[in-house]
């Protein structure tokens, strides 16, 4: 269902890589997306390895969400070839909890198996919502709702976790907590992660590798080699941040202290 | 404290800055506090009805209104009691209730199924939606002659009229809710790999439920209305039949009793649906 294979490739009868080598779990080849005449994604190749945490940066409107939706299998209009794990979860910028189901029912929605509810409770505990399983989603705060959405994504034990600015709407304090939580959960469930964000610091704190999307292509693809625990004051942190900001077209000196607000 | 000393700008003394005190529960000016009611609201509301009844009774007792025009309240009350004790009222209510219930039990599922068919498939929408929206403007009561031609004047005719009347509000409200469902929730269902049936059950139907219930309330009102109409036109039983029979003998007390019974039945159905609403829409904030 996700093999959006162009007919040309079929005609050439290329071998399909059914078993992907060296632990690659995401392989996207020549991914192109047009909206009318506009080419938003232009012939993108991308690979993500098992358990790898990749952050995707880019200016607003650069096509980050479009790429993520393509990998999620939500976009049938995308050209190219995409191979992804069958077990994958998406967390959107809004928590997208169904208001008419309790938090626990939302978390286990569509989950099969007799112990689904027990698993759901366990994951809710893990994200610190143990007491809220029977609550209605509308009674949760923004951060709580987003944690419930994270629980819903993780309870499926995804091989690939797709996060589209999941913390974008949260306040700075809650965001720090969510970073810690996400790191802990990723260490436990070890999914490959694609985190779309426009917060450079967030990318540097969490990711093993950072991509920058510019003009429909991946203009920068760098590993984040900063010793853990990562601190914003580290020399490596600062220099990589400058490089990423430059790639995103932000002039740090000229924009001074407004930099972080405007990203 | 005088009102002047209490003005905020004087308290804080900032010239040129206009400050206002916001009303909080414990800072309300004593003069502005509403006078405590001596009479509870419910009793005040009842007073109007009681007054009307008293005037009506007075008019009847003094002979201003002839019982042939309108029977007085006492008269109506005793007739009501007679009709209850001799069983005529109970029988009539039961027959009428059955007609409405059967009509709704058929009409509601029909409207719902049509709405699902039209809301969930392109073919369904093309086939059903414009047809329903055209037929909606046919005055239902105007269908009566045709229905009599088809079904005669028996039970089938009365029930079909109710079925048709009920189908439309259910359809229009539910189909519209399904059509305007939040696409983000459908997208979520796709990422969670819900089956088509699970998507309908967990996402589509709950989203359409509030509108469906609005439709159900409208449908109930229409059902009672059509019942009154068809029972007065031709019936050998039921409340409408009692009324027509009473009309021939100028028994205005019986007519008034029947009207009141219709009103109470309509009210009770509405209360019933509200109760169901309160239960199944618990998740809505402010409930
Ligand atoms: N369904 C669509 N139809 C037409 N244009 C679209 C559609 N979806 C996205 N686009 C366009 O594609 C471009 C990329 O959109 P996308 O949502 O991927 O940006 P983004 O990088 O996620 O931006 P942001 O950081 O603001 O979320 C935008 O210019 C947008 O207008
Ligand atoms: Mg986006």
Image (spheres, helix red, strand yellow):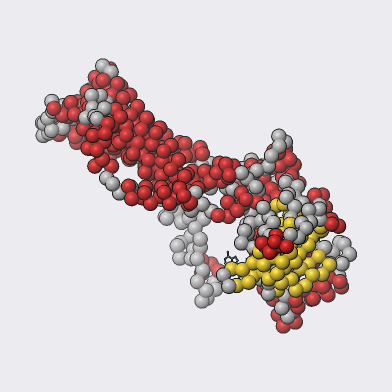
* Picture quadrant where residue B100 is located: top left
Q: Which residue is nearer to you in this view: A9 or B215? A: A9
Q: Residue at x 78, y 62 (%)?
A: A47
B114 sits left or right of A10 in the view: left
Q: Is A137 rendered above or below residue B147?
A: below
Query: Residue B95: horizontal and vertical position, in percent?
Result: 31, 24
Query: Residue A149: horizontal and vertical position, in percent?
Result: 67, 51
Q: Quadrant of the C terminus of chain A?
A: bottom right
* Picture quadrant where residue B147 is located: top left
Q: Is residue B32 visible to us here?
A: yes
Q: Residue at x 24, y 42 (%)?
A: B142
Q: Residue at x 76, y 68 (%)?
A: A211
Q: Is residue A231 visible to us here?
A: no
Q: Which residue is nearer to you in this view: B196 or A114? A: B196
Say how many tags the image has. Answer: 0
Q: Is B219 rendered above or below residue B125?
A: above
Query: Residue B276: horizontal and vertical position, in percent?
Result: 47, 36
* Picture quadrant where residue B216 is located: top left
Q: Which residue is nearer to you in this view: A85 or A186? A: A85
Query: Residue A97: horizontal and vertical position, in percent?
Result: 61, 50
Q: Given the current orientation, which residue lies at the most extreme bottom position? A: A254
């Amino acid at each position: 269902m996700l093999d959006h294979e162009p007919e040309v490739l079929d005609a050439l009868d290329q071998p399909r890589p059914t078993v992907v080598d060296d632990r690659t779990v995401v392989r996207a080849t020549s991914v192109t997306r047009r909206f009318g005449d506009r080419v938003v994604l232009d012939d993108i190749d991308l690979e993500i390895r098992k358990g790898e945490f990749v952050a995707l940066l880019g200016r607003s409107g650069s096509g980050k969400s479009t790429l993520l939706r393509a990998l999620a299998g939500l976009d049938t209009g995308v050209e190219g070839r995409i191979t992804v794990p069958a077990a994958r979860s998406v967390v959107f910028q809004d928590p997208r909890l169904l208001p008419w189901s309790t938090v626990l029912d939302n978390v286990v929605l569509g989950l099969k198996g007799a112990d689904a509810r027990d698993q759901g409770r366990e994951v809710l505990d893990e994200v610190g919502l143990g007491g809220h399983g029977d609550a209605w989603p509308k009674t949760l705060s923004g951060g709580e709702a987003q944690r419930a959405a994270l629980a819903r994504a993780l309870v499926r034990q995804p091989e690939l976790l797709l996060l589209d600015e999941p913390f974008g709407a949260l306040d700075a304090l809650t965001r720090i907590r969510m970073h810690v939580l996400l790191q802990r959960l990723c260490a436990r469930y070890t999914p490959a992660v694609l985190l779309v964000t426009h917060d450079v610091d967030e990318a540097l704190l969490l990711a093993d590798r950072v991509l920058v999307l510019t003009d429909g292509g991946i203009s920068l693809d760098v590993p984040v080699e900063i010793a853990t625990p990562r601190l914003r004051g580290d020399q490596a942190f600062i220099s990589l941040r400058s490089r990423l900001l430059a790639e995103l077209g932000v002039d740090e000196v000229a924009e001074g202290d407004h930099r972080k607000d405007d990203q | 404290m005088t009102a002047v000393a209490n003005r905020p700008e004087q308290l804080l003394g900032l010239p040129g800055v206009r400050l206002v005190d916001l009303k909080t529960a414990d800072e309300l000016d004593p003069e502005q506090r509403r006078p405590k009611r001596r009479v509870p609201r419910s009793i005040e509301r009842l007073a109007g009805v009681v007054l009307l009844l008293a005037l009506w009774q007075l008019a009847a007792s003094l002979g201003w209104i002839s019982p042939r025009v309108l029977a007085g309240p006492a008269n109506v009350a005793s007739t009501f009691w007679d009709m209850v004790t001799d069983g005529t009222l109970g029988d009539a209510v039961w027959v009428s209730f059955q007609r409405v219930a059967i009509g709704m039990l058929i009409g509601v599922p029909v409207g719902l199924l049509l709405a699902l068919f039209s809301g969930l498939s392109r073919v369904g929408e093309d086939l059903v939606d414009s047809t329903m929206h055209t037929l909606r403007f046919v005055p239902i009561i105007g269908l009566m002659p045709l229905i009599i031609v088809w079904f005669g004047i028996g039970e089938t005719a009365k029930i079909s009229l109710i079925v048709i009347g009920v189908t439309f509000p259910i359809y229009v409200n539910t189909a519209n809710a399904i059509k305007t469902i939040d696409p983000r929730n459908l997208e979520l269902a796709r990422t969670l790999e819900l089956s088509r049936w699970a998507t309908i059950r967990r996402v589509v139907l709950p989203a359409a439920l509030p509108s469906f219930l609005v439709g159900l309330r409208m449908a109930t009102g229409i059902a009672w209305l059509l019942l009154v109409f068809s029972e007065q036109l031709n019936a050998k039983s039921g409340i409408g039949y009692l009324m027509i029979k009473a009309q021939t003998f100028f028994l205005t007390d019986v007519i008034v009793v029947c009207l009141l019974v219709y009103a109470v039945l309509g009210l009770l159905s509405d209360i019933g649906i509200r109760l169901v609403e309160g239960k199944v829409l618990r998740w809505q904030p402010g409930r």
